[in-house]
Amino acid sequence: MEPEAPLYKDPTQPVEARVKDLLSRMTLQEKAAQMAQIERRVATPAALTNLAIGSVLSAGGSPPRDGATAEEWADMVDEMQRWALASRLGIPIIYGSDAIHGHNNLFGATIFPHNVGLGATRDRELARRIGEVTALEVRASGIQWTFAPCLAVCRDPRWGRCFECYGEEPEIVQMMTSIVSGLQGSPPEGHHSGHPFLAGPRNVIACAKHFVGDGGTHKGINEGNTICSYEELERIHMSPYPDCFNQGVCTVMASYSSWNGEPLHSSHFLITDVLKDKLGFKGLVVSDWEGIDRLCKPHGSNYRYCVAASINAGVDMIMVPFRYEKFLEDLISLVESGEVPISRIDDAVERILRVKFVSGIFEQPFSDRSLLDVVGCKEHRLLARVAVRKSLVLLKNGKEARQPFLPLKKNAKKILVAGTHADNIGYQCGGWTITWYGASGRITAGTSILEAIREAVGEETEVVHEPNPTASTLLQQQKEPFSYAIVVVGEAPYAEMLGDRTDLSIPFNGHDTLSLIAGTIPTVALIVSGRPLVLEAQLLNQIEALVAVWLPGTEGGGVTDCLFGDCDFHGVLPVSWFRSVDQLPMHSSIGDGYNPLFPIGFGLRMFDKQL
């Protein structure tokens, strides 16, 4: 007679009963291991089977190999899952990845506009649908957890994560939290706010981040200090979180930043008293990458202190990500010495197990190979193209209001397409694409803006492409004039602190390129960037039209849909477009001193009135 299966393996039992039963069977070492998240490069059978590590992640790309397919990703994750299921209690891992604008670590996936562009759409339903598509492509690769969405309210565009934010006002961010219901599915009526929810195996665990205040740091310094009252922190930076809790968001990530000098990773008041107790969050709180190491200087030099401070503050799972043996040694020692109460460990592990049971991963631990064909499929790319259309913000159209420059004529005889960003998928996608900070060139499958222009114009139209035009380029204008020029300039990809800038001029001599061309040829300027950039008055007077393209992702056809009049412009600014960096920080709530070049909410249409 076979022994009766333990209660925690019975899917008909209530989640809380399963959590309680499994927790009662775990040793201190197994509990501590569930609290560790490790990078895939150190995930071995010894770590996942012998120690029962709780989670694995791919950080900033980290594929099985360069250019790996979804099937190869699924093979890797499933193998690690088999190791985890072979542990004494058979607790599955949850595998995490930064799928923040589509499944951006996967070559060939559908890459959507970054959040700053989505904020320009003000479209809740679009955000939800993007979440659905992202979930399917992430699940196709075997991954169950995405570290998205970012709920930061960006108050200063000098910050290198501005492009990850939906806008500078909390109302815009709140509106776009509907992506959580797309990623996780919509909870049923009567679902208790703060309790984790996942609809099924075609949805992914979402992560509201970074709690809290990361978008309000002094001078926009990444991992900096947000200086404000609690009332301001709650009103501005905390306000999007309850919207996610109402949708059953499963996880929250702590912020690298500090609040009035106290690091979030060690703030018992904000993590436990506010997030868990006041706001009623019952899911798990995860640290950021080596987030606890930053609690001492040099980073991680007093690791025992870092572990104690973060766990006692209320962080449940630590993104270690490499030295997990040291983490387990210190955490177990801290519990045995009484410096970390066993009640805190049990609370953390209860939360981790709750998310795992809610996610259904005990019943369906492996990837669904029937989803492989959805990655980068036509339907998904069409949605991304729609998102691009809706994100574009038309800032100028004609030197005279009664003489609009757009839409462009498709049957022009000869046109010039210039600028560093016209034919560069990597620049279009920005950071967090294939790698952590992104890259230049054809880094994944997609349609560049130049390719989309060639597809949109008439068969007889000659398209001349000059990435770096010079005075000799303009000699052609004298021989056989260009009808118009489309000049595409902007920022190189970046992520986090690599994007912190005090000089927000257009990189790659973008200003000079625009000025050179616009001085001779009627020009529409497309700015590919994760934030507003400096636009001098002289340049604005020279160009005929100006479009903020943001970081549109792989579907450049969405840009030409609007440029050539197949669709009207829809987007409005999610952030204030400053005149000079001397005005920063600038946001619409500063009062009488608010004097932007273009205010938040500004956007023109071609066929209708100003938005």
Image: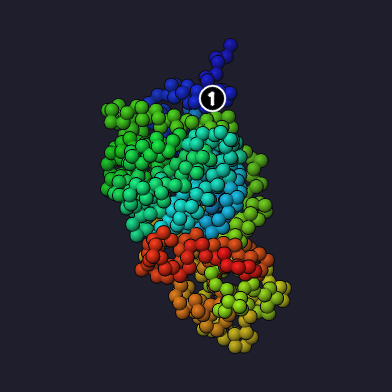
Q: Is 153 positioned to the left or the right of 467 in the image?
A: left
Task: Identify the residue under disc 1.
Answer: 14
**Relative depth, front residue between 120 and 472:** 120
**Relative depth, front residue between 500 and 75:** 500
With respect to residue 298, does 543 lie above or below?
below
User: What element does badge 1 sit on?
Assistant: loop
Q: Residue furthest bottom?
A: 478
Q: Residue furthest right?
A: 459
The C terminus lies in which quarter of the figure? bottom right
The N terminus lies in which quarter of the figure? top right
Q: How many marks?
A: 1
Check disc 1: other Cα within 10 Å, few if <14, some if 14-19, many if 20+: few
Q: Residue furthest top?
A: 1
Visible residue check, residue 503: no
**Relative depth, front residue between 491 and 315:** 315
With respect to residue 67, does 141 lie above or below?
above
Q: Which residue corresponds to the image point at 50% horizontal and 79% vertical from the top-left?
A: 541
The percent position of residue 341, horizontal first and vertical second, equals 32, 28
The percent position of residue 213, horizontal first and vertical second, equals 38, 50
Q: Which residue corresponds to the image point at 54% horizontal and 44% vertical from the top-left?
A: 180
**Relative depth, front residue between 61 and 165:** 165
Name which quarter of the figure residue 29 lies in.
top left
The percent position of residue 40, horizontal first and vertical second, equals 47, 42
Q: Which residue corresponds to the image point at 40% horizontal and 32% vertical from the top-left?
A: 348
Visible residue check, residue 389: yes
